[in-house]
Amino acid sequence: MNVITDFLIIGSGIGALSYALKVADSGRVTIVTKGEMNECNTHYAQGGICSVTYSPDTFEKHINDTMVCGSGRCEIDTVRLVVERAPDSIKDLIQWGVSFDKSSDGKYELAREGGHTESRILHHKDITGAEIERALISQVKRHPNIEVLEHHFAIDIITQHHLGKLVRKHTPNIRCFGAYVLDLRHKNICTITSKVTVLATGGVGNIYHTTTNPSVATGDGIAMVHRAKGVVENMEFIQFHPTSLYNPGERPSFLITEAMRGFGGVLKLQNGKEFMDKYHPMGSLAPRDVVARSIDHELKISGEEFVYLDITHRNADEIISHFPNIYKKCLSIGIDITKDMIPVTPAAHYCCGGITANLHGETSIKRLYALGETASTGLHGANRLASNSLIEAAVFADEAAKHSLLHIDKIIPQDGVPDWNYEGTSNPEEMVLITQNYKEMQQIMSNYVGIVRSNLRLERAMRRMEIIFNETEELYLKSTLSQNLCELRNMIAVGYLIIKQAQQLKESVGLHYTLDYPKK
């Protein structure tokens, strides 16, 4: 099956679906997602989405909190754009049917999370992302111009390279003409050509052994752009969420939202002592990088595998009302959070870097946009402020939609794109060749490129990753493609980018902390 469309969107989170709804009245939209539509990072976002809503909060306060959390590495123009346009994006979401919690006086109930100096987090219980996905999916399914291809895996974006032209890192005017997509049910590869392509493929968490991300978060969009010689930046800044539920054997790790610390939760050692005050003046409400690194340090000192998050001092009914999903999950494994402290440990959570995108969401490759966690817009800098991610995706979806609609009539569809070449490939003889490299890749990244790094660890990681890369490429070239093989290939590419860019940064800043260049 070959498809010709106006707008090809790869991904199905808040950025992808918001963009689709914004452009659907102006052309044919094709959404490609490798699982079900709601299987994305947006769906699993618990805490909420931030926007200045009521006084005494102000745009300047939100801007300052973002800049401080980002360790001075944020792009001020991007920060100002997102913060000032956030209220309009919230209105769009509400218009599409998203329900945010309100207090008894009818005003929106705003939570506060780590790094925020004011309460500005709109939420729906502790399943905000799921509520946003529910509303957006409902709108998308009703629109006659939007076609959704579930269980379709994007292998590579199509550029001049596929038309027989040499494309290098510094080739000017690289252009995207669509993507090669694997139909996972029928096992055939279709060619989708488009005037505009949008990558909103989410995060990279599964390159690590422990992550809060769903299994689909394998860095596909970032890897595709890297192979297409596009610009990818700031990959060294991987955010580890400080508080995932310690429940060995469960994957992905269940997230204990940062909003619980904003609600009054206190981090404690297994002996019951508080410890965050010695690391940061905001204590348990410190920015995530500080909290994750502090917990990591305490665990290394004690040799234990988790610390506790204590919320038992708050009213039990209020705890259950605010965090019903967390209450239910913890109760299922014998923990009553109204009476018992919650065992938590850091887990890979968010990629602050990604495909370089400008204020319109444009990448270095013409006709290609990047949205959400896949993109590096400059908003997060060296560390993401809690709940800034969902609003970034919504604001940039609007920006990218407006920009692409201004230019789409000038874009001439590309003819002569060849079909996928199956020549010389066969089914892999042994699945173990894929699964073993997958496990090794996760071990390398977790042990050498985690919360705390060093030059020696990064050097070892690069040497070992190169071996796995060569083995996987050899298998890829001679194999009939599968999702497992393609995801492994993408994660190795992303791991390489993280290691390489971490080696280039000769200082500790934000989420990149190295023993060789400790902070003064």
Image (cartoon, helix red, strand yellow):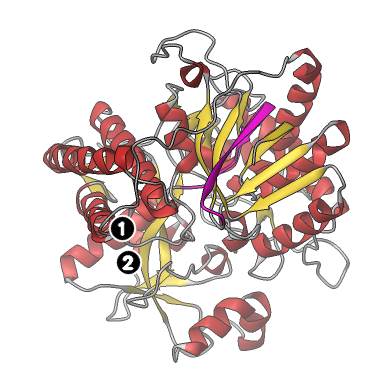
Q: Position of residue 439 (x, y in %)?
A: 25, 58
Residue at the top extreme, as displayed: 172
Nearer to me, 398 or 75: 398
What is the x, y in percent for residue 73? 45, 30
Q: Which residue is mark 1?
A: 294
Magenta-colored span: 186-203
In the image, 411: left or right of 231?
A: right
* Image quadrant occupied by the N terminus: top right
In this view, 414 is above or below 113: above
Would you say 490 lies left or right of 104 here?
left
Q: Is residue 478 above or below residue 14?
A: above
Mark 2: give few (<14), some (14-19) or many (20+) Cα within 10 Å: some
**Residue 438 falls in which quadrant of the image?**
bottom left
In the rendered image, the quadrant that contains the C terminus is top left
Ranked by sequence position, the earlier of labels 2 and 1 is: 2
Tell me the kind of residue under disc 1: Ser
Secondary structure under tag 1 reads helix
Kind of residue at badge 2? Phe
Q: Residue at x 49, y 31 (%)?
A: 355
Residue 7 x %, y %: 72, 32
Tag on residue 275? 2
Q: Are marks 2 and 1 in contact (CB under 8 Å)?
A: yes
Query: In the rendered structure, does residue 370 fall within the stretch colored magenta?
Result: no
Given this view, does label 2 or label 1 mark the residue nearer the observer?
Answer: 1
Rounded to the nearest angstrom, the CA distance separating label 2 from label 1 is: 9 Å
Q: Which residue is pictured at 18% across the width and 71% down the height?
A: 302
Q: Residues within 10 Å of mark 1 (few under 14, many from 20)?
A: some
